[in-house]
Image: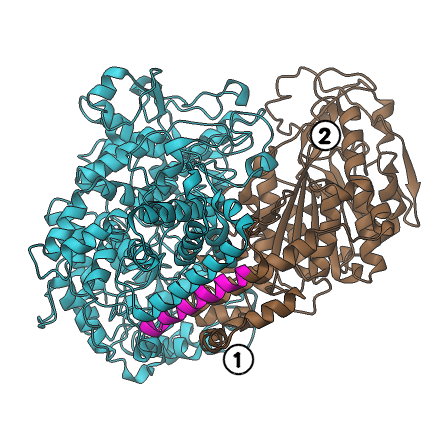
Chain colours: A cyan, B brown
């Protein structure tokens, strides 16, 4: 029997939650303790991972004509032996599946040895119990429309609904919420989350402990109003839309997609509702009386790589571009890995190859070309192009930061007229020169059927995507914002909500947030404020031994996470705290300090990016978001700090800790220059070293200094002062770093010593950590 | 002397918190540089998979891959085709071409005139392998290497072909071969990265390289190839400012560690102790890497062996010498790229310059490893991303012609690390166009390299976004005939 969609969550709520990655205590919970085995949460992850590759959705690779992902097929008589059944509800001993997974005959055993897959004892036990309990199938949770379920009973600790859901989960594993973080921690945390910038000493002072005139809510509102909000969130969207400043491939010449980046910042700052934000990007050009702004948004689909390698086969690459558009959209917006179905029916998710190319067909009707010539005739944008004139810059596109008199061109979307419309075919094995059956634009049925009422083009796709019946769009985005804030999504595999993805840690919370988000006009700033107003968010990040033992990965949110800042924000923090940051929004990307020879060593020698020409002046002090990204040699510092290389759509970054990061913080001229400039300005304000050190500390760590820290830092300062006084020859070489002017009067041991103290502060673990 | 100063710098305070902060993180078996996210926690299945490594006794412990970027012509190096010389200017028979696709560069040509090697070939060694006069040093070590004349690939353009060789897929952001080995086998040296990349540029028509070729893809960033540069800062940001002595750096790190310790006491977060460990490793690298890149102490015999260029940083010869030193110190995978092999025109002239750049040093590397007793455990690979056409691109003259890309057949060589020596494997037809015996697909080659390293290529997988990925994608067979 199949449970109705409506009943799934009711059932789930009563099930002790099981993590798919099986890394917590609960995985050791004995099977006997599980009252009701759940297909979605217990069984499907096992079948999907170990069985579906041969007994799943992919018809071409199906063995013994048996599929276990569909209930009726699993219960039907076996093709090879009509007297036997794969699964007999309630009777494991009569179920061939069970016999085969416990078989001691290597020829019988499933999964077969050559698959290199194996079922564990507990997995076998779960399957047995599931069959005993009637082998109930359920639809995949993520493909069922989310609904708001009853909010668990409120507790005093809770500030809003989020806390009720979170509390219930942590309580179930025996954890209590952490106390609230200290006010200065909250200010730093909120500032980093909403703007990517550290709070200034003035901000810390104004809000103090929130007992005065200025409340925590006012802090959030103020931060949400800053232009830096759009810049912060744009980093995520640049990863997702694989934004770059060059074409990639071979000669990797310059392109000009940056006005798209400026639009994203503008849209986030204007709080353009997420459904419209998506619609414009998917199909802005197809909207009635489309504005240039709406057309500009479609550059989302054109940020991928373009080849300029002489001798390529045009159609091979045109197809490659359409594949990239399809894959980016499905992963970034819908959280599904459609690309597996490019070459064959999906092995785990219910997407056929036909459905893949139906989806692909939406993006396959543009005048785009596979090859427009080699690097010698390269242009900053490729067909179809949006031209931006001065009038636009003074009008509807005034958010584009551009002062040059030449007009701008951006690669955007366009649609071929009906009479020249391009047919789409299933490509055998996904290869460009092996077309088979013709297909027409449509969406995977298992997610949501494409209504006949919608136009069969990208505009229809946008309407389908932003329909409140779409089970994925809101869930995926809410999860992305959760990931931005907590470091890990409620669904850990933020780009894969399919069968092989991680199950949500808090399914009811995810659904509640997704529905609430849609009900409130897809309001992104509201979503941020909602999450950040919760008690869950406002907890201290202190880790207890209980946490380490019960929940090392912080799945149950009984504390705030401690997270290393993203690459861009490391740069932002250093520049902002030193006073060097130039807070100009948008404009062409900038080339800051970079070790010599990196571009040159890897270049073919052709194109304007063959050599790195560093910018000067204020371009050196812009936010990390604006760093020029040459695809074949992405900015090395950012890569060292786990940024995306922008080769493909990415929505989750790693967070590693390596010696190369230590080397950057120790020796990057940007860090050293910032330290020198801050030291100089502090001596302009303060006469005594304790005052200067104190201000440096507050600017960089965003909190008051403890007495032990004060002692250590003052001791180090005295030591360094002695060093530079006794080695005067080291003073100037130490201070002479970076382009920022160094005045003669500042060349003294005091400045050099204070600079060393500041360098040491920038190198603290806490400095580049969100606490 | 410096060491003593440093030891004294270890004040009591530091010793105390370093021991508190260490928490066993030094024992990370996987991962070269890092202690990954301590909390990332691998799944039980993944842990079991890693514990099974190596899958069988490895023949090679380390790899040095001398990538000849741009695709050197097999017809002027290892695949001797006298028929092409005899058939100069005649059209490639359609019976041989069989409608194979062409690149856009020659698709417009109305004829495909055959052209033979401008350079003579001779047979060498016990294997009697044919080698052109451009590679005399390689000829002298022919009995130590295995020439594979039957390589073939799927891509016809540089970028996808290079990416295919290095990551097993033509497009996509997949981990490089070196990253896979770093992930599977970890590092043998705690002061150096497991995967190092060295770049050089020849004098011929070049094609760029891209950092995605040594990317970790979806693996942890600690498995990323670390690119060495030929500047005075061999690893990015390695070099301290001029005025900073080792003891001052030591002092600053102690200061940082003492401050971090206070933070650890407040937050109790193991990530803080991991950070301190990484600063210690950075400090050790600052000493270890320059020692490695300093060739000034190499004896004359070595300089003579590799050629005088080995003293000029950034040359292929210098990189070969550096590769030997890194490998000898336990670096798992050293990847060289030498650019300039894309001879669409002016081939006889450019090819000679390119061969001169690499011939002596490539052979020297083999000789040097052998004399140190390291060749047996070090796998050396020499080759490009595809081959070149037997017909001429553009204007044809006996001494001046060009060749387009040819993925259907090309030659590479391998040596050491359990590969059969003194052998020629595979054959092409007399036109050098199609393989007639023992084809080796790129995935077969990768499977074989993994096998030599003790890894079953089907078992070293990483689950990413729902799918288990491996270097050889969904194919690849170990070529057992290549293994000693």
- The residue that mark 2 highlights is B203
Compare residues B348 and B92 and report the one nearer the observer. Answer: B348
Mark drawn on residue A174: none
Q: Which residues are magenta?
A: B248-269
- The residue that mark 1 highlights is A104
Q: Does any portion of residue A568 appear in the rendered image? A: no
Residue A684 placement (x, y as % from top left): 32, 45
Chain under numbered label 1 = A
Q: Which quarter of the figure has residue A533?
A: bottom left
Q: Which quarter of the figure has residue B343?
A: top right
Q: Is residue A151 above or below residue B153?
A: below
Q: Does any portion of residue A124 appear in the rendered image? A: yes
Chain under numbered label 2 = B
User: Which tag is nearer the camera, tag 2 or tag 1?
Assistant: 2
Compare residues A81 and B221 and report the one nearer the observer. Answer: B221
Q: Is residue B263 magenta?
A: yes
Q: Which quarter of the figure has residue A505?
A: bottom left
Q: Is residue A652 magenta?
A: no
Residue B198 placement (x, y as % from top left): 65, 46
Compare residues A163 and A390 and report the one nearer the observer. Answer: A390
């Amino acid at each position: 029997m199949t449970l109705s969609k409506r009943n799934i969550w009711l059932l789930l709520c009563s099930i002790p939650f099981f993590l798919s990655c099986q890394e917590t205590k609960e995985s050791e919970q004995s099977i006997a303790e599980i009252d009701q085995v759940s297909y979605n949460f217990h069984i499907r992850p096992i079948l999907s991972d170990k069985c579906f590759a041969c007994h799943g959705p992919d018809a071409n690779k199906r063995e013994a004509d048996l599929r276990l992902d569909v209930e009726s097929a699993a219960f039907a008589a076996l093709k090879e032996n009509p007297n036997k059944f794969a699964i007999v509800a309630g009777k494991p001993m009569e179920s061939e599946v069970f016999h085969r997974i416990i078989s001691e005959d290597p020829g019988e055993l499933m999964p077969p040895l050559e698959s290199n897959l194996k079922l564990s004892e507990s997995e076998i036990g779960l399957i047995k119990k599931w069959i005993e309990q009637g082998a109930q199938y359920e639809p995949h949770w993520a493909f069922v429309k989310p609904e708001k379920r009853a909010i668990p009973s409120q507790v005093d600790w809770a500030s809003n609904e989020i806390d009720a859901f979170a509390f219930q989960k942590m309580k179930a594993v025996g954890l209590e919420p952490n106390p609230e973080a200290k006010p200065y921690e909250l200010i730093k945390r909120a500032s980093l989350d909403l703007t990517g910038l550290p709070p200034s000493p003035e901000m810390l002072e104004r809000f103090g402990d929130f007992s005065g005139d200025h409340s925590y809510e006012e802090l959030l509102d103020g931060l949400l109003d800053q232009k830096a909000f759009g810049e912060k969130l744009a980093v995520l969207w640049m990863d997702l839309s694989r934004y770059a400043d060059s074409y990639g491939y071979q000669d990797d010449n310059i392109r000009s997609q940056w006005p798209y980046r400026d639009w994203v910042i503008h849209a986030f700052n204007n709080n353009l509702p997420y459904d419209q934000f998506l619609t414009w990007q998917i199909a802005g050009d197809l909207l009635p009386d489309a504005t240039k702004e709406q057309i500009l948004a479609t550059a989302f689909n054109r940020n991928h790589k373009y080849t300029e390698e002489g001798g390529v086969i045009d159609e091979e690459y045109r197809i490659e571009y359409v594949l990239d558009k399809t894959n980016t959209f499905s992963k970034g917006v819908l959280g599904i890995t459609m690309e597996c179905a490019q070459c064959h029916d999906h092995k785990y998710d219910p997407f056929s190859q036909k459905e893949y190319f139906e989806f692909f067909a939406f993006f396959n009707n543009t005048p785009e070309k596979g090859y427009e010539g080699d690097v010698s005739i390269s242009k900053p944008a490729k067909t179809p192009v949006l031209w931006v004139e001065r009038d636009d810059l003074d009008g509807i596109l005034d958010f584009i930061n551009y002062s040059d008199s030449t007009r701008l061109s951006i690669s955007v979307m366009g649609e071929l007229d009906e009479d020249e419309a391009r047919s789409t075919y299933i490509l055998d094995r996904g290869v460009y020169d092996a077309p088979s059956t013709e297909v027409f634009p449509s969406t995977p049925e298992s997610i949501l059927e494409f209504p006949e009422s919608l136009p069969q083009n990208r505009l229809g796709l946008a309407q389908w995507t932003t329909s409140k019946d779409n089970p994925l769009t809101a869930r995926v985005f809410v999860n992305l914002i959760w990931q931005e804030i907590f470091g890990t999504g409620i669904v850990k595999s933020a780009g894969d909500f399919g069968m092989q993805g991680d199950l949500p840690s808090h399914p009811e919370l995810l659904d509640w947030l997704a529905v609430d988000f849609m009900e409130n006009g897809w309001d992104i700033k509201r979503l941020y404020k909602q999450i950040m107003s919760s008690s869950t968010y406002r907890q201290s990040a202190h880790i207890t031994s209980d946490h380490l033992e019960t929940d090392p990965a912080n799945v149950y949110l009984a504390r705030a996470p401690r997270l290393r800042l993203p690459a861009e924000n490391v740069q932002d923090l250093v520049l902002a705290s030193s006073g060097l940051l130039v807070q100009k929004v948008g404009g062409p990307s900038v080339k800051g300090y970079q070790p010599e020879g990196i571009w040159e060593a890897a270049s073919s020698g052709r194109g304007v990016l063959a050599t790195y020409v560093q910018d000067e002046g204020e371009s050196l002090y812009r936010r990390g978001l604006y760093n020029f990204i040459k695809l074949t040699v992405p900015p090395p510092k950012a890569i060292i700090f786990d940024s995306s290389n922008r080769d493909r759509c990415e929505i989750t970054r790693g967070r590693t800790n390596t010696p190369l990061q230590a080397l950057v913080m120790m020796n990057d001229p940007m860090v050293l220059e910032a330290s020198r400039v801050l030291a100089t300005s502090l001596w302009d304000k303060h006469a005594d070293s304790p005052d200067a050190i104190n201000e440096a500390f507050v600017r960089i760590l965003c909190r008051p200094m403890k007495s032990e820290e004060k002692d250590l830092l003052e001791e180090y300062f005295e030591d360094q002062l002695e060093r530079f006084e006794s080695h005067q020859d080291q003073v100037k070489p130490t201070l002479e770093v970076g382009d920022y002017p160094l005045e003669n009067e500042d060349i003294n041991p005091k400045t050099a010593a204070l600079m060393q103290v500041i360098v040491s502060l920038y190198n603290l673990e806490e400095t580049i950590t969100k606490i | 002397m410096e060491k003593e100063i440093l030891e004294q710098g270890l004040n009591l305070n530091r010793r105390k918190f370093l021991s508190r902060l260490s928490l066993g993180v030094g024992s990370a078996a996987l991962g070269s540089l890092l202690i990954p996210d301590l909390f990332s926690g691998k799944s039980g299945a993944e842990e079991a998979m890693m514990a099974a490594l190596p899958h069988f006794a490895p023949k090679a412990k380390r790899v040095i891959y001398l990538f000849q970027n741009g695709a050197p012509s097999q017809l002027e190096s290892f695949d001797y085709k006298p028929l092409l010389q005899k058939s100069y200017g005649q059209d490639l028979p359609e019976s041989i071409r069989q409608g194979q696709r062409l690149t856009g560069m020659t698709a417009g040509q109305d004829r495909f005139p055959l052209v033979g090697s401008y350079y003579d070939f001779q047979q060498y060694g016990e294997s009697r392998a044919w080698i052109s006069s451009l590679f005399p040093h390689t000829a002298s070590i022919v009995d130590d290497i295995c020439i594979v004349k039957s390589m073939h690939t799927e891509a016809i353009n540089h970028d996808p072909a290079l990416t295919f060789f290095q990551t097993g897929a033509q497009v996509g952001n997949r981990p490089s071969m070196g990253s896979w080995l770093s992930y599977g086998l970890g590092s043998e040296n705690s002061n150096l990265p497991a995967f190092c990349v060295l770049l050089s540029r020849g004098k011929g028509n070049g094609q760029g390289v891209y950092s995605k070729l040594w990317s970790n893809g979806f693996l942890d960033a600690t498995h990323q190839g670390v690119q060495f540069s030929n500047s005075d800062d061999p690893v990015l940001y390695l070099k301290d400012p001029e005025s900073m002595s080792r003891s001052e750096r030591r002092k600053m790190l102690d200061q940082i560690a003492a401050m971090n310790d206070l933070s650890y006491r407040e937050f109790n977060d193991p990530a803080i102790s991991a950070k301190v460990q990484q600063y210690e490793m950075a400090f050790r690298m600052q000493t270890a890497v320059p020692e490695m890149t300093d060739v000034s102490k190499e004896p004359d015999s070595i300089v003579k062996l590799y050629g005088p260029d080995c003293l000029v940083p950034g040359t292929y010869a210098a990189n070969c010498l550096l590769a030997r030193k890194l490998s000898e110190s336990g670096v798992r995978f050293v990847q060289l790229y030498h650019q300039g092999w894309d001879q669409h025109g002016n081939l006889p002239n450019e090819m000679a310059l390119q061969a001169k750049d690499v011939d002596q040093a490539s052979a020297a590397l083999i000789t040097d490893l052998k004399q140190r007793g390291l060749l047996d455990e070090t796998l050396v690979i020499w080759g490009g991303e595809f081959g070149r056409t037997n017909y001429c691109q553009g204007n044809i003259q006996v001494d001046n012609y060009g060749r387009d890309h040819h993925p259907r057949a090309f030659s590479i060589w391998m040596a050491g690390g359990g590969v059969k020596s003194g052998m020629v494997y595979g054959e092409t037809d007399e036109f050098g166009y199609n393989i007639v015996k023992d084809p080796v697909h790129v995935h077969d080659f990768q499977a074989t390299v993994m096998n030599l390293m003790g890894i079953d290529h089907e078992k070293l997988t990483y689950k990413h976004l729902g799918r288990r990925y491996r270097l050889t994608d969904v194919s690849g067979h170990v070529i057992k005939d290549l293994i000693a």
